[in-house]
């Protein structure tokens, strides 16, 4: 895009290196892809601390420790001093900054990345108008989010592109030998009250019915948050506390071993903008049971590599039973999911697609 030296990119994010959610990993992959293609990248992360670990040495990083005013000042300075060719806004909350960017750096291409619920409802004119008037491209991780956003922002299809998440190949991992049960379910989710839409509680409610059919079934929940004590109380009230194991956040190595030791991934979420945890599960050969709402049905191929069902305990129990009760079907679904990840969600595919989107925006002058 730039005819005079490497591409200069400023990336604005809520959090990049201080968290392990799907959005943070997506942002890290954006940075990785850009630097691999030779771009000079400046990252401004509103929530990250300045001393956060894991920042690549070839990235200029500003952790703003939740100071909005510092972010605004650093951004304005970057427009005048760094003079970026491309500005990537990795959350719709930053949309108002597109206006000063258009005034101070008119030739810079502005690209907004969107994920899910943050753009599913009307944000008000202060956010909607800059997106409609200043964003050269809008990049969505799923068709569902793309369609929901278009209906409330009034964005034209010609400016919207699709760039789903990617995942790196996972080395073979031995199963965690400490896991209990002849059949084992696993979920991965933040356990905060605002994440009730993940419906981990509905899986717990399904456990009594499942235990009547699979008496040695155990359920492992990876993740943590303020919702966890309520879920633990719920498991005790349902009489399944000994079968539901809250593991907290695990290292990647320990999580891989737990995946390798389980038989089925269950997360009947209704608010997924994509669901990168589905890719993780498939990578380890696990079929997925999820909801028939949100973006999940766009990602999980019902009857092929998982099941998309109403997010209610009875429907969840039927789907889990149908897969665990048929070992040949379970293994075939797991193989289909693993092959789908390899052929569709690799890093090089992501990097090439990102490069194409930026090239589409046109050349940038210094």
Image (spheres, rainbow, N blue to C red):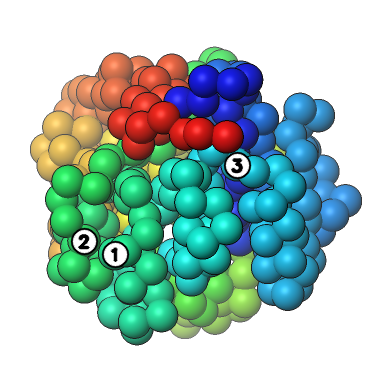
> Is residue 258 visible in this depiction of the protein?
no
Tell me if label 3 and label 2 are in contact, CB under 8 Å: no
Mark 2 falls on what kind of element? Answer: loop
Residue 149, by quadrant, is: bottom left
Mark 1 falls on what kind of element? Answer: helix
Which residue matches tag 1?
Answer: 132
Q: What residue lies at 44% left-to-right and 49% top-to-bottom?
A: 110
Depth check: 296 or 110 in front?
A: 110
Which residue matches tag 3?
Answer: 84
Q: What residue lies at 82% left-to-right and 43% top-to-bottom?
A: 53
158 in relation to 256, above or below: below
Mark nearest the camera among 3 and 2 is 3
Give the percent coordinates (x, y) of residue 68.
69, 73
The answer to whether 358 appears left or right of 254 in the picture is: left
Quadrant where the N terminus sits is: top left
Query: Mark 3 or mark 1: which comes first in sequence?
Result: 3
Which residue matches tag 2?
Answer: 155
Label 3 to label 1, Cα distance in Å? 21 Å
Query: Mark 2 or mark 1: which comes first in sequence?
Result: 1
Give the percent coordinates (x, y) of residue 11.
59, 47
Label 3 to label 2, Cα distance in Å? 25 Å
């Amino acid at each position: 895009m730039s005819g005079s030296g490497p591409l200069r990119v400023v990336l604005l994010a809520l959090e990049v290196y201080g968290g392990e959610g799907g959005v943070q990993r997506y942002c890290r992959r954006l940075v990785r892809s850009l630097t691999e293609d030779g771009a000079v990248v400046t990252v401004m992360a509103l929530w990250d601390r300045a001393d956060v670990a894991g920042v690549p040495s070839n990235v200029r990083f500003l952790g703003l420790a939740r100071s909005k005013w510092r972010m605004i000042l650093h951004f304005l300075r970057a427009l005048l001093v760094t003079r970026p060719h491309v500005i990537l806004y990795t959350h719709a909350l930053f949309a108002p900054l597109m206006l000063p960017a258009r005034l101070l750096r008119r030739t810079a291409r502005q690209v907004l990345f969107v994920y899910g619920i943050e753009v599913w409802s009307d944000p008000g004119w202060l956010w909607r108008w800059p997106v409609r008037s200043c964003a050269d491209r809008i990049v969505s991780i799923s068709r569902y989010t793309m369609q929901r956003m278009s209906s409330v922002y009034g964005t034209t299809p010609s400016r919207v592109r699709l760039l789903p998440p990617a995942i790196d190949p996972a080395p073979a991992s031995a199963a965690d030998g400490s896991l209990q049960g002849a059949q084992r379910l696993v979920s991965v989710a933040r356990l905060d009250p605002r994440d009730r839409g993940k419906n981990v509680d509905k899986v717990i409610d399904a456990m009594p019915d499942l235990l009547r059919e699979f008496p040695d079934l155990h359920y492992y929940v990876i993740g943590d948050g303020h919702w966890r004590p309520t879920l633990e109380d719920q498991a005790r009230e349902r009489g399944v506390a000994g079968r539901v194991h809250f593991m907290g956040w695990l290292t990647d190595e320990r999580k891989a071993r737990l995946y390798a030791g389980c038989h089925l991934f269950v997360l009947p979420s209704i608010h997924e903008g994509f669901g990168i945890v589905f890719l993780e599960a498939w990578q380890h050969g696990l079929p997925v049971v999820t909801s028939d709402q949100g973006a999940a049905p766009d990602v999980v191929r019902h009857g092929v590599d998982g099941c998309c069902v109403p997010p209610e305990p009875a429907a969840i129990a039927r789907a889990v039973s149908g897969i665990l009760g048929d070992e040949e079907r379970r293994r075939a679904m797991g193989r289909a999911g693993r092959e789908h990840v390899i052929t569709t969600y690799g890093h090089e595919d992501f990097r090439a697609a990102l490069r194409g989107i930026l090239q589409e925006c046109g050349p940038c002058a210094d």
